[in-house]
Amino acid sequence: DVLVFATGSSAVRIPIPNADCAHVFRTADDVKNMYENSIYGIIGALPSFVELIKEYNHFPNPILLEGENGMGKAYFSMLFYLLSNRIASPYIHISGDLLTEKSWEFLLKHHQSPLCDTNTTICFTDLDSLSHEKLTTLLSYILSGQCARNNRLIFSFADSYSKLPEATVTQYKNKLHCNVIPLTPLRDNPASIKNMATLYI
């Protein structure tokens, strides 16, 4: 297995012994193409949300995206990166539902872990897939080092937190001083549906 460490328009493949590829390293061009060719890029984000992203990009605090499953939180993370001043540095996507024991060990214990990087945007999605114990361990790891200080961290949980104790999510919010951004479903903004459908068609 390999991880692809990408910065700017170049990429370097790093062999990871006994690790599953749960960490996706992408260049700025890759992220831009993925976002612009997605439904979210085609219909465009609401202007108010774009302004909110620009505002929060002035602050180093981690971002916590809240919303129902299917809201496209990974794509909104990409937009945070594309509108930031970090696009010359890597964008890393770590999907909680793909983390095996091997990749979990690599993430927390290997010196080439993306969590040891600097000036990187690291997006954690599907954290609801992790156990309470692993989420607590991950939070302790981040708090004990410089990961949050040296990088832009973006987390996402499902809105209901049905699989997790709510106190676990609250710890992430409070101890990391996250800026929380709720993503509202289209049913809460019916006036936009017609325009979005026209743009998509």
Image (tube, rainbow, N blue to C red):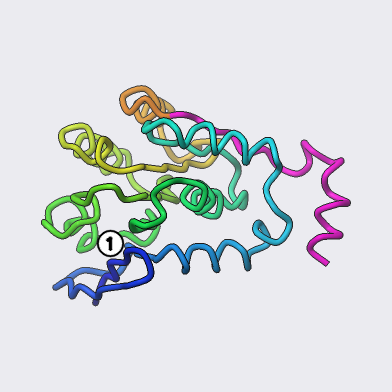
Q: Is residue 71 left or right of residue 156?
A: right
Expressed as whole percent of the image width and height from the top left, the position of residue 97 reads 40, 57
Expressed as whole percent of the image width and height from the top left, the position of residue 171 reads 34, 26
**Residue type indicated by callout 1:** Thr
Quadrant holding the C terminus: bottom right
- Give whichever of 182, 79 is nearer the camera: 79
* Magenta residues, start to end: 179-201
**Magenta stretch contains residue 95:** no
Residue at x 19% of width, y 37% of height? 146
Residue at x 26% of width, y 43% of height? 134
Task: Give the prevailing secondary structure in the magenta stretch.
Answer: helix
Q: Is residue 142 left or right of residue 93?
A: left
Q: Is residue 55 left or right of residue 62?
A: right
- Give whichever of 55, 129 is nearer the camera: 55
Quadrant holding the N terminus: bottom left
Depicted 145 relative to depicted 119: above or below: above
Residue under numbered circle 1: 100
Expressed as whole percent of the image width and height from the top left, the position of residue 196 reads 80, 54
Q: Is residue 22 left or right of residue 2?
A: right
- Give whichever of 29, 128 is nearer the camera: 29
Depicted 66 relative to depicted 194: above or below: above
Residue at x 25% of width, y 40% of height? 150
